[in-house]
């Protein structure tokens, strides 16, 4: 059996910066409220002509260059997003076309904020067995074209931003004792409607109506309080699960990379678990919540900042819509 290792990290965020002050002009909110409740100062939005495919393409170029690889070295593309460009086919197929590597498999993963860790777990199984050798794992999101710029949608709109990030995964012999040590995946569909988009839906006849548009049911809806409280609880549980499984103490972990949902969630978990905030890496201040892109975006920037070195123990953890939650422990 092989071990899965990270060969290269890359990210891309669109150049358009949208500050909290900018949002004040479109809805009843304040910079102070957003910063206090979430830690977010600004986020990035795509402009016409730029989407998940273009952003992921740019992030892939960065990761390939850092890994010293060519796109032809990749034998599988796994792409996590909750904002696919089209209902079908999956966005991974469009990215594969842009990257110019026909024939290799291309798989879309949903799982929202937890999508990257679900994707990592899927990739890990293929690499461990030797079926694929180098996997491009993408997390990418365009929220800005599907959120409501009005007071009705303010609780959700202020949180989300656009961006893409990738990790190139490869194989190491098990004897190296490095790489992905374990992944832990969970879901609880009883809470699926606590954070969701109702329409367009294949249950609706037809899938989209004028009424859906008027009532705003094509925008995300969230039970923010419930998401917040459950996230804090599940983050703690799933981090403990990863540590216990590997018989590792939290003090031995060099860096915790949380899904960037809300800085207060990270602070609450760290306080409860007695993890110093200095052991976390956060960039939600600049990008908001980029759902599936948030963990690889934080990983790529943490690596750039010299916060991840060979043999470091890195813990990834995520919670989000579904509900879904997950963790991964990696010896870098
Ligand atoms: O990846 C998972 C994605 N989602 C999350 O992680 C979100 C988790 N939840 C949260 O982060 C928080 O629940 C929020 C940041 C969304 C809201 O913070 P909160 O402290 O839970 O506020 P709240 O929902 O209890 O709302 C307090 C007040 C309400 O007004 P009233 O009813 O007290 O008059 C809201 O209407 O804040 C109001 N409010 C806002 N005010 C200004 C909600 N959104 C905004 C806003 N600006 N953007």
Image (tube, rainbow, N blue to C red):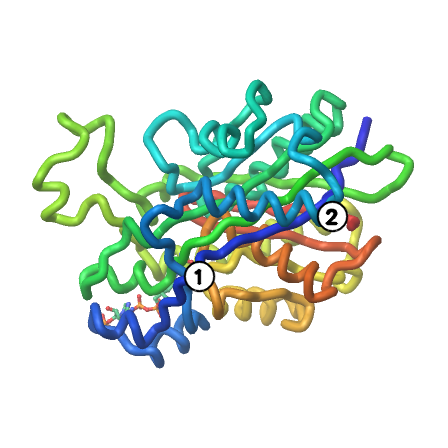
Q: Which residue is mark 2?
A: 330
Q: Nearer the viewer, residue 70 or 171?
A: 70
* Label 2: element kind: strand
Q: Report how far apart the C-alphas of labels 1 and 2 lie in the structure.
A: 31 Å
Residue that protrudes farthest toward the top in the picture = 103
The quadrant the N terminus occupies is top right
Residue 271 disc label: none
Give the crowd class for mark 2: few <14, some 14-19, many >=20 residues within 10 Å: many
Residue underneath mark 1: 15
Q: At 40% from the left edge and 55% from the top edge, which residue is drawn?
A: 227
Quadrant hosting ligand 1: bottom left
Q: Is residue 181 visible?
A: no
Q: Quadrant of residue 73?
A: top right
Is residue 251 found left or right of 19 in the rendered image?
right
Please say if the residues under marks 1 and 2 sit with CB atoms less than 8 Å apart. no
Q: Earlier in the sequence, mark 1 or mark 2?
A: 1
């Amino acid at each position: 059996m092989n071990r899965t290792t990270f060969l290269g990290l890359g990210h891309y965020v669109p150049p358009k910066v949208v500050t909290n002050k900018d949002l004040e002009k479109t809805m009843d909110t304040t910079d102070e409220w957003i910063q206090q409740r979430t830690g977010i100062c600004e986020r990035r939005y795509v402009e016409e002509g730029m989407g998940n495919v273009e952003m992921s393409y740019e992030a892939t170029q960065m990761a390939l260059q850092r890994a010293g690889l060519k796109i032809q070295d990749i034998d599988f593309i796994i792409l996590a997003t909750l904002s696919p460009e089209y209902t079908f086919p999956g966005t991974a197929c469009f990215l594969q076309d842009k990257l110019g590597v026909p024939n290799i498999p291309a798989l879309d993963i949903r799982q929202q904020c937890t999508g990257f860790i679900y994707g990592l777990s899927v990739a890990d199984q293929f690499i461990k067995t030797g079926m694929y050798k180098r996997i491009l794992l993408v997390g990418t999101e365009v929220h800005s074209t599907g959120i409501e710029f009005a007071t009705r949608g303010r609780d959700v709109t202020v949180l989300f931003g656009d961006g893409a990030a990738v990790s190139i995964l490869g194989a190491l012999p098990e004897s190296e004792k490095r790489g992905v040590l374990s992944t832990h995946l969970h879901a609880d569909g009883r809470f699926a409607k606590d954070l969701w988009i109702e329409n367009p839906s294949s249950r609706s006849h037809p899938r989209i109506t004028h009424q859906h548009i008027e009532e705003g049911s094509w925008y995300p809806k969230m039970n923010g309080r419930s998401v917040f409280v459950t996230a804090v609880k599940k983050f703690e549980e799933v981090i403990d699960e990863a540590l216990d499984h590997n018989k590792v103490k939290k003090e031995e972990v060099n860096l915790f990379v949380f899904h960037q949902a809300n800085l207060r969630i990270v602070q609450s978990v760290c306080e409860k678990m007695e993890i110093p905030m200095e052991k976390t890496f956060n960039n939600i201040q600049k990008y908001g919540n980029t759902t599936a892109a948030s963990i690889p975006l934080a990983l790529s920037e943490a690596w750039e900042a010299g916060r991840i070195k060979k043999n470091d123990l890195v813990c990834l953890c995520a919670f989000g819509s579904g509900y879904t939650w997950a963790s991964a422990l990696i010896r870098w």
